[in-house]
Amino acid sequence: MDSKLKQELLSKDKQYVWHPFTQMKDYEHRDHLLIERAEGIFLIDADGRRYYDTVSSWWCNVHGHGHPRIKAAIQRQLDAFDHIMFSGLTHAPGIELAEKLVEITPEGLDKVFYSDNGSTAVEVALKMSFQYWQQIGKTSKTKFVYLDGSYHGDTLGAVSVGGVELYHALFKPLLFHAHRVPAADLRQARGAGVMDESEAAAARLESEREVAESALAAVRELFEREGDTIAGIVVEPMLMGAGGMIMTPAAYMQGLRELCTQHNVHLIADEVATGFGRTGKMFACEHAGVSPDIMCLSKGLTAGVMPLAVTLCTDEIYAAFYDDYHTQKTFFHGHSFTGNPVACAVAIESLRLFEEEQVLERAQASAVALAAALRDSGLTELPHVADVRQLGLVAAFDLYADAERREPFHPEQRIGAAIYQAGFEEGLILRPLGDTLYFWLPLCVTPEEVRDIVARTVRVLRRVLS
């Protein structure tokens, strides 16, 4: 890009743009990284420098940037028509995508409701669950449960069931009351991490069951005491993202499923981030072999290319809304861009790529390479690194002033922010969560690229933490 144009754009960026999750004063004397192009796993800035997109552009990108089949799907749909409303009208992409999603999601999720992003998918789930209980006569079931450290979006309903104080505490006067329960954090398990020795794995599995049961005890006690007033529990299966990449055991999801069935509570799975292969399975619920009552999807739904979200539910829930109009049991909810046909066409093409190019199968080799790189790169030997963990193509670790004693860095040191900036020098887009550093890699990443990413990250850590 011409240097004059670059400076003009960056000046206007400071003048007009308010970036998300950003203290804009941080950029008073420096600029945002100006991206001009993207291809595959790389972002390319206005000066032609290339950066690994290690966070998949906020956990969205699946097949790499600029995939030719995705671009062709957009063009084909635009040649037909761009957008129409989805109330009273319908179209082939919306119908075909719904059919495909019912086929591939966990058993029992038979109806698809479209929206446009992860937060709204969760809002739909909350309203759907609440209205269901009202319409079948269980009018006392009005409360929801969420996990400490959970994140389900930034609209007010989603914030009401969010457990990250940094993001949510300020807005409490605007929120509805919900019950908070502890998460089953695998960092509490003995031998947690990426080891694969058989004896260590057996010990770890037993410890994971103990972590799961400890967290389930709080849910059990709450359901036994308040179950008649609880509509649903919202959970990020296996991996809680924004709360610090908290990984949870499969036994926890299995226990939640049993408790929800026993106490007649909806299990709402927020797979906005974990859906579409990132954890090594198409959906994270598959690791536990459970089917939720409601599932929220977005981000990777369109391969991270266009805004689209869905909330799937069971036929039983749908039936409570299916009645003569005068009963007013309609689900009065919708969005201007509900079921956008271009986005639906992209999602269909993405799912075809999964089938025809064996995306999940190929990603397994990269996940194995990631585990090996985390072990062999010297990362785990760094004195400030602790709790290295991995699930599929997601990996994370925590940074401490004293890792052995888990003593954190002083917040004013802003270690995570320093690593973010230093990453640019190594050609990495790293976006830590506080002092938790993570990889959220696209499924197109190769084993060679994985090893290179981890090696570059270790160099960044050595430089910043020395």
Image: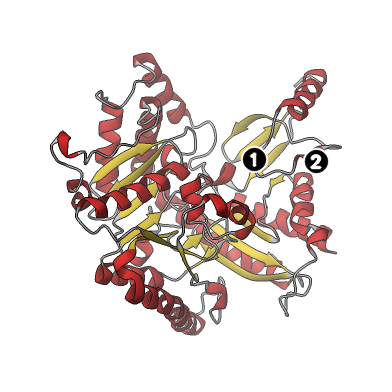
Q: Secondary structure at mark 1?
A: loop
In the image, 339: left or right of 177? Answer: left
Left of 243 or right of it: where is 24?
Answer: right
Q: Position of residue 57 (x, y in %)?
A: 58, 42
Q: Residue furthest left?
A: 324
Residue 203 is situated, as x and y percent measured from the top left of the image, at 48, 85
Residue 343 visible in image: yes
Pick the residue in front: 384 or 166. Answer: 166
The picture places residue 444, in percent across and down from the top left corner, at 51, 44
Quadrant where the C terminus lies? bottom right
Callout 2: few (<14), some (14-19), or many (20+) C-alpha neighbours within 10 Å?
few
Local crowd at mark 1 within 10 Å, few (<14), some, or many (≥20)? few
Q: How is the image coloured?
A: secondary structure
Going 56% across and 53% down the picture, which residue do you hit?
A: 173
Left or right of 385: which side holds 390?
Answer: left
The residue shown at (71%, 56%) is 457
The x and y percentages for residue 162 are 51, 56
Is the residue 342 above or below the residue 170 in the image?
above
Q: Earlier in the sequence, mark 1 or mark 2?
A: 1
Task: Give residue 307's mark.
Answer: none
Q: Can you say which quadrant of the picture contains the N terminus?
A: top right
Amino acid on which the number 2 mark rests in the picture = Lys
Q: In which quadrant of the rendered view does residue 32 lie?
A: top right
Figure check: 92 above or below 40 = above
User: As drawn, is 52 to the left or to the right of 236?
Assistant: right
Q: Residue 25's mark? A: 2
Q: CA distance from mark 1 to mark 2?
A: 13 Å
Q: Check disc 1 and give the amino acid type.
A: Pro
| Secondary-structure class at tag 2 | helix
Residue on which the image places disc 1: 20
Observer-nearest residue: 77 or 361?
Answer: 77
